[in-house]
Amino acid sequence: MKSKYIEEIIVKILMALSLLAVVGFAASIVYTIFHRGWSCITWEMVSSLPGGGFYIGKEGGFLNAIVGSVYIVAASTFLGLLISIPVVFYLNIFLKSNSKFAYVARLAYDVLFGIPSIVYGAFAFTLMIWLGLRTSLLGGILVTTLLIIPIMIRSMDEVTKTFPRDLLDASYSLGATRLETMGVVLRQIMPGIATATLLSVGRAIGDAAGVMFTAGFSDSIPSSLSQPAATLPLSIFFQLSAPQAEVQNRAYAAALVLTGIVLVISLAGRFIMHRFSKNKI
Amino acid sequence: MLSRIFKQIGFSVIKPDTDDLLHADARLEVRHFDLWIGDQPILKDISLQIPEHKITCIIGPSGCGKSTLLKSFNRLIDSVDGVRMRGSITLGGQDILRSNGANLIDLRRRIGLVPQRPCPLPMSIYGNIAYGCRIHGIRGRRKLDAVVRHYLTEVGLWDEVKERLREPAGGLSIGQQQRLCLARSLAVEPEFILADEATSALDPQSSKIVEDLFVKLKEHYSIIMVTHTLRQALRIADYVVFIYMGEVIETGDAGQVFHHPQHELTRNYLSGVFS
């Protein structure tokens, strides 16, 4: 009896330590970003475009990167949801549970999930050369959409798999069509969709490799889909690569903005998720 | 039944032009019905005529095919992998087994379902009742309010929930949820109610309320109930179907089957030799 008690205490301590390690890790990143970024962030940085010598320490800001990132993330999340939700419905409601097609499709999404974004970028770049296209906002949006689709599908799919089948029967037995029943499914899996969206936004906004090849980089805000666009991760990368400490600190200011955007989206997502999931069974 | 609904709430989910056609004959008949799942025969040569405005209890040991038969009536059995059916099940002359598309949707509306475990939709209490009406084209706040009030009153839930109609249905007690599911089924104006062990997940008091409701509702609806509890069948059944290993062994009025069973298997089942 006593050994069981000790066993439980040891396991409890191990769990607490693991949790502490994760929280500590996250806290140290946030601390570093705040510590180095907060002291040099100015309104000018977030509200103006880079001037001529911005990357060697002269005046300007990184509004181009903020706007570029927001454009790419918003558009790719929208497109991603537009493609992923029907796929998840098809896999879980229209196909039988032992469908071989569903099995192969899930395997394919798992493989895509694991492919590094630089491969997506290189693939899209090859395709763009073949089609005679130049780096553009559209290219960045498309490659980011491709990058996040497997994340969206797999995380929504896991939630939808646990969807109670009785709910389908309840809806069908009232004379609902499959399309009408999807409305019920959508309400039930809403928290799953919200989680998938948050994960995807996190991945999309933080990705540098995919957009490097496809969206390129520009010191101005793109006014059309065919113009190149800057992104925050690439802006951070370019500033960190500079030899001057002042420019490197600006990179931390950009990282602070990036972290802030992710934080705001996460909190907003949680709030919306809570509102939509209050009727969940 | 329709005139009753018209009188009380002033409109119906049933389109007036199809009403006479659909309701002229509402008998549910099963003829030489066989069902397989994969290669396994589950139901064998079932022939039955379900009496109208009565409670028909389908009894039999676990795994004998009671629920499968019930799910065949509204074709929810379709979602089971590898299911094959032969024979016919007709509702008012319309073959259920050969129905698809719009016909199947209308048949399902005509045959309500109360599941084993209460299964409220992920909506508010109000939304659960209004859902069926909305999908059948009834819009407008005033109309839906009337439907919700009428059917919640019919199942005795109105006074308990009238102050919190907009709250999630998942917050109700299990017994209340089951009555909500019944009200939801009634709101699309079915002629039959299928109840698959509808009281097995409920506490004795809630179970009694639901049982009493069925007895009250049989005046307007024909009720088919699968039950595991012989005492319950004895209390409320008017007509009994005893199934054993996928075959109908005996059917008849409840008094006759329970007190003067003709078949030895029925006698053994009722006396508890097997269950």
Image (tube, helix red, strand yellow):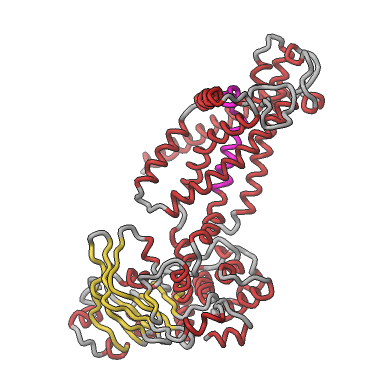
Magenta segment: A192-213
* Residue A210 is covered by the magenta coloring: yes
Q: Identify which residue, A92 or A240, lies in the foreground.
A: A92
Dominant secondary structure of the residues highlighted in magenta in the image: helix
Q: Which residue does the image show at 41% across and 69% down from the upper left? A: B116
Q: Say if residue B264 shows up in the picture.
A: yes
Image vertical order of residue A220 relative to residue A100, above or below:
above
Farthest residue to the left: give it.
Answer: B264
State which quarter of the image contains the N terminus of chain A.
top left
Image vertical order of residue A81 relative to residue B260, above or below:
above
Q: Say if residue A203 shows up in the picture.
A: no
Across and down, in percent, residue B172 comes to: 56, 67
Across and down, in percent, residue B267 comes to: 21, 83
Number of marks drawn: 0
Across and down, in percent, residue B100 comes to: 42, 67
User: Taking B43 as reference, is A221 left or right?
Assistant: right
* Residue A214 is covered by the magenta coloring: no
Image vertical order of residue B38 relative to residue A44, above or below:
below
User: Taking B219 as reference, is A128 left or right?
Assistant: right
Across and down, in percent, residue B75 comes to: 39, 68
User: Taking B190 as reference, is A56 left or right?
Assistant: right
Residue A199 occupies quadrant: top right
Q: Identify which residue, B255 or B93, lies in the foreground.
A: B93
